[in-house]
Amino acid sequence: MAQDIKIPEGILCSNTHEWVMEENDKCIIGLTDYAIEQLGDIVFVELPEIGSEFVKNEVFATIESVKAASEIYMPVGGKIVEVNEELINSPEIINEDPYEKGWLVKIETENLQDDLVGLLEYEDYKEEVS
């Protein structure tokens, strides 16, 4: 994997290797570079329908790689307002650029401040997983 991955400021990570970042009145959710390194080359992504609602820690997506299939957990609860359609035909984008082009979904949240409890800043997350 490319070593020059740019980590956005303000990103928070879950202990199940998802990241969340606030953007205006929404949150963007994706998979951390550490998770992607563990998975290897991603070959398939199953994303939820727009309008679906999930609570924190609920499975919302599935990713398959050359090594394994993995469930992806919602780091904060909310309603899906956008999915990254590009990933359906080009799941390798997640490997190439997990934080910019490789995001999974955008959600609207109601209890964001409560849901952010327990998430780690990127530097703390990297220390935990290394």
Image: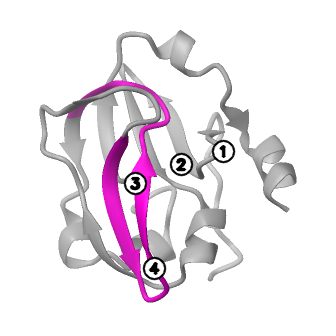
Badge number at residue 68: 4
Element assignment for label 3:
loop
Q: Position of residue 80 (x, y in %)?
A: 23, 34
Residue 83 in picture, x, y percent from top left: 22, 49
- Give the mark nearest the N terminus, 3 or 4: 4
Cα–Cα gap, marks 4 and 2 = 17 Å
- At horizontal 81% and vertical 46% (from top left) the residue drawn is 123
The residue wearing badge 3 is 103
Q: In the shown orientation, is residue 111 left or right of residue 4?
A: left
Between circles 3 and 1, the one closer to the viewer is 1
What residue does disc 1 label? 15
N-term mark: 3 or 1: 1
Membership of 65 in magenta stretch: yes
Q: Which residues are magenta?
A: 59-80
What residue is at 18 percent from the left and 60 percent from the top? 85
Residue 1, above or below 23 = below
First-in-chain label (4 vs 2): 2
The residue labelled by disc 2 is 18
Decide whether the magenta segment is chiefly helix, strand or loop: strand
Does the magenta segment cover residue 38? Answer: no
